[in-house]
Image (cartoon, rainbow, N blue to C red):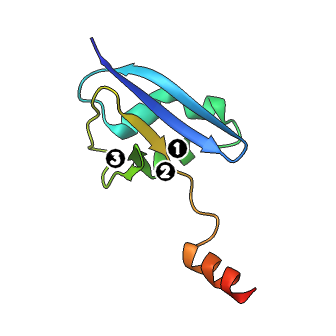
Amino acid sequence: MGLQVEVAFALPERQRIVALEVPAGTTARQAVALAELEKHFPELSAAHFAEADLGIFGQLLRDPDTHRLRTGDRVEVYRPLEIDPKEARLRRAGR
């Protein structure tokens, strides 16, 4: 019996959570590949998901290529920031 995990990704207008059963020892990066998110978000390439930052329940993973999953983990695929948070604060302060 494998591990029950989820892989989540969201764009501003929609999200997808893919439930998977993966073998013990599966890494976060491997789970993202198994979720085949590019089929649900055809406007993004498989390379986008293969290179994205990953986290589990809001905690950024330092090395998703070696982080082994546990049952119940939700791997989150993060999008790059559209604007640097410091720049956004400076713009708001300038108004």
In the image, residue 53 lies at what x, y percent? Answer: 45, 52
Furthest toward the right, the residue is 95
Q: Where does the N terminus fall, quadrant-wise? A: top left
Q: Residue at x 65, y 43 (%)?
A: 44
Cα separation, mark 1 vs mark 3, equals 12 Å
Residue beneath label 3, please? 64
- Left or right: 20, with 24 as reference point: right
Residue appearing at x 66%, y 45% in the figure: 11
Judge whether 3 appears above or below 59 on screen: above
Q: Secondary structure at mark 3?
A: loop
Rounded to the nearest whole Å, what is the CA distance between mark 2 and mark 3? 10 Å
**Which residue bears the numbered disc 2?**
52
Pointer 2 with pointer 1, Cβ within 8 A: yes
Q: Nearer the viewer, residue 4 or 68?
A: 4
Residue 31 in the figure: left or right of residue 16: left
Question: What amino acid type should be assigned to the residue bearing mark 2?
Answer: Ala
Q: Residue 92: give x, y in percent of width and height.
A: 69, 80
User: Could you tell whether 34 is left or right of 62 in the image?
Assistant: right
> Quadrant of the rendered structure where residue 26 is?
top left
Q: Mark 2 packing: few (<14 Cα in 10 Å), some, or many (20+)?
A: some
Tell me the residue at 47%/23% (across/down). 19
Crowd class of label 3 (few under 14; some 14 to 19; many from 20; radius 10 Å): many
First in residue order: circle 2 vs circle 3: 2
Q: Which residue is mark 1?
A: 49
**Contact (Cβ within 8 Å) of mark 1 with mark 3:** no
Residue 46: percent from left, percent from top? 56, 40
Farthest residue in the top direction?
A: 1
Q: Disc 2 and disc 1: Cα gap in Å?
A: 5 Å
